[in-house]
Amino acid sequence: MALNFWYELKHVCKQSGARYGILHTPHGDFETPIFMPVGTKANVKTLIPSEVKEVSDGLILGNTYHLWLQPGDEIIKEFGGIRGFMKWDGALLTDSGGFQVFSLSKIRKITEEGVEFRHHKSGEKLFLSPEKSIEIQNNLGADIIMSFDECPPFDSTPKYLKESVDRTIRWAKRGKDAHKNPDTQALFGIVQGAGNKELRRYCLEKLMEIDFPGYSIGGLSVGESKEEMYEMLKYLKTIMPSDKPRYLMGVGSPDDLVMGAINGIDMFDCVLPSRNARHGTAFTSYGKVQVKNTKFIKEHNPLDPKCDCFVCKNYSAAYLNHLIRSDEILGMRLLTYHNLYFLKNLMKNIRQAIQEDRLLDFKEEFFKEFGYTK
């Protein structure tokens, strides 16, 4: 177990059962629930690290698969890991490459030893095993790293799903055995099992026997309905260990952050806020908006009058509309900054509501204002 990493549960919301805690890492202590911006290739797209610091709580992600391919984990290691490479003084989490096993399903082959890939651009043959994934992540140097897993499709047959879960458990054990920096890098196990509650429990119990300092929930938000995802989270809330952090991977829409917190999740990440921004979509206190909409062409007010971020304090909605319509990079930058700030503020409000035992009331208020309920 990582000696410089632990989770401290501070309060459970009497109204919802949501958790407020502190995540202690080698590079900072973080209040949870927390949203972590995604820096896939050692950068949060369009922003520089000082800006990321302003719109995050100081814990961000890097992508193992993409950094392995370019520039290479050995090169990044020479710079002192991702933190030294990108000049980031906060904390970091890296995924394992396991999601690419799912997303690149047309160009990969799974065996017991690992996964044979075709490079998603060049077609070059690549091979990733649990041991190789951990070696790469050891070189990347994140505070929190992930076990190499398989993310099976949500509609997998029961037979394949059982085989996949068993393989993920075996891979988790192999990855832990290969981990060279357990005192400085916390290795999480990943709970798989798609929509099968019995297999989810089985996977969690076997991972707990191996013993990890934290547990991730994978294989959700991959095409199933929100109701199916929330039902699974509600179930897992009752069986996951209370003294370890719970990380829901790849989920970050505002409604999912609120519902995830209600269902006991401590950590979230997603490319959604930055990806939406690059396509001209913004989160606001009155809902999600398309910034190039004609109603903003002459709008003197900020995009979100209730937001106190740098963008809303300094620029009109009309200017943002102009930038997005003109495909200006500055427009993408400003919207990325705003969207991440919006989620940072949302998580702050969620944590406050948990501590005040009123998260269900907050959910009703927020859903009504944002437009989730009419």
Image: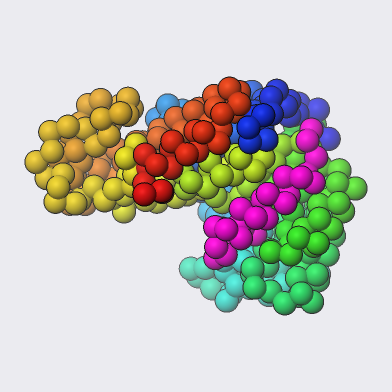
Q: In the image, which residues are magenta? A: 219-243
Quarter of the view holding residue 138 = top right
Horizontal relation, residue 189 to residue 264: left or right: right
- Residue 178 coordinates in the image, percent (x, y): 83, 49
Furthest residue toward right: 209
Horizontal relation, residue 179 to residue 350: left or right: right
Camera-side residue of 357 and 219: 357
Which residue: 67% across, 40% down? 264
Horizontal relation, residue 8 to residue 258: left or right: right
Camera-side residue of 334 and 263: 263
Q: Is residue 238 visible?
A: yes
Quarter of the view holding residue 351 = top right
Which residue: 54% across, 57% down? 226
Horizontal relation, residue 6 to residue 300: left or right: right
Above or below, 174 relative to 185: below
Q: Is residue 239 magenta?
A: yes
**What colouring method underlies this structural image?**
rainbow
Q: How many marks?
A: 0
Above or below, 370 relative to 27: below
The image quadrant where one finds the N terminus is top right
Furthest residue toward left: 298
Camera-side residue of 72 and 220: 220
Quarter of the view holding residue 20 = top right
- Residue 345 coordinates in the image, percent (x, y): 44, 30
Q: Is residue 57 visible?
A: no
Q: Is residue 142 magenta?
A: no
- Residue 366 coordinates in the image, percent (x, y): 43, 37
Which residue: 65% across, 29% down? 13
- Residue 143 coordinates in the image, percent (x, y): 67, 34
